[in-house]
Image (tube, rainbow, N blue to C red):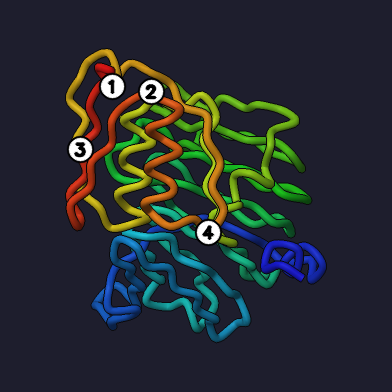
Amino acid sequence: MTFVAGVIAAGLVAVLVTQIHPPWTVMDRGTEYVTRAGQRETVTLSDGTRFTLAPESRLALSRHYASGDRAVTLDGEAFFAVVHDAAHPFSVRAGRAVATDVGTAFDVRAYPGEQAVQVAVFEGAVHVARGAADQSTLTARDEASVTDRGIRVARDADVAAVVGWTRGALAFHSAPLPDVVRALERWYDLEIVATDTGLLGQRVTIETTDDTPDRTLATLGAVLRAHVERHGRQVRITPDTR
C-alpha cells in the first residue's frame, strides 16, 4: 500500500507544506521542521498527524500545538495525513491562504516566489479562506488556486498527479519551463541555467518516477529539443543547433 493510499484508507487528512534543515529545531514560535534541496522528511506529531516535507520546505507549529492549537505555517510543500479532531481543527496557513481540515485528505503547495497557493482535495472537504470575505469549500477532486485576485476552483482535477511527489513521481502538464527548472533544482539539488528566450517560453509535459537526475534531464532535453550539459550540480540548457 502506498503512503497516499494508506492516508485515504485511514480516513485522515493530507496537506502540503514547506521545509528546512536539520529536520527540526525548537523556536520561540514553536517547533520548526526543515528540509534541504534533494531531501524529503516524514514526521509523526504527538496527535498522530503525519506529514512528509518536500525539498526546500519549512513547516512551523504553533507554540501551543500540543495543547490543542493545531495551527501550522508553511513555506514550500508538504503532504499531511491529519488526524481529525472537530474540537481542535487542524489548519495550514500558506501565503495568502488558510486551509482547514473538515475531515478529509488534501494537498497544499506554497513555495516562496510562486504567484498562487494551490490546494487540491483528495477526498472529503476542505475549507479555504483568503481573508474573511473570500472563502470556498472544496470537495473531492477540486483544486483551488489562491492569488491576490481571489480563489479560483477547478473541478475534476488530476489530484493523484499532484501528490505523486510523495512516492517519488514528478508530473508537469503544460508547465512553463521556468517552473519546471525551479522544481528540478529543489528535487535534485541542482543549479540549472536556461537563458534562451525561445526555450524559456516553452511549456513542458513530462512525468518521472524515481528517475536519476541525468535521466530526467535527458527527458527534458528531448522534449525541448535542446542540449543539456551537466557538470556536478551545474546544468546548462541551450538550443540544439544540430
Circle 3: residue type: Arg
Dot 1 alpha-carbon crowd within 10 angstroms: few under 14, some 14 to 19, many 20 or more: few
**Circle 2 residue:** 225
Dot 3 alpha-carbon crowd within 10 angstroms: few under 14, some 14 to 19, many 20 or more: some
**Circle 4 residue:** 210
Q: CA distance from mark 2 to mark 4?
A: 23 Å
Q: x and y percent of residue 188 in the render?
A: 34, 56
For the point 52% across and 35% down, the residue is: 206
Callout 1 secondary element:
loop
Q: CA distance from mark 2 to mark 3?
A: 14 Å
Circle 2: residue type: Arg
**Circle 1 residue:** 240
Callout 2 secondary element:
loop
Dot 2 alpha-carbon crowd within 10 angstroms: few under 14, some 14 to 19, many 20 or more: some
Disc 2 vs disc 1: Cβ atoms closer than 8 Å? yes
**Circle 3 residue:** 236
Mark 2 vs mark 3, foreground winner is 2
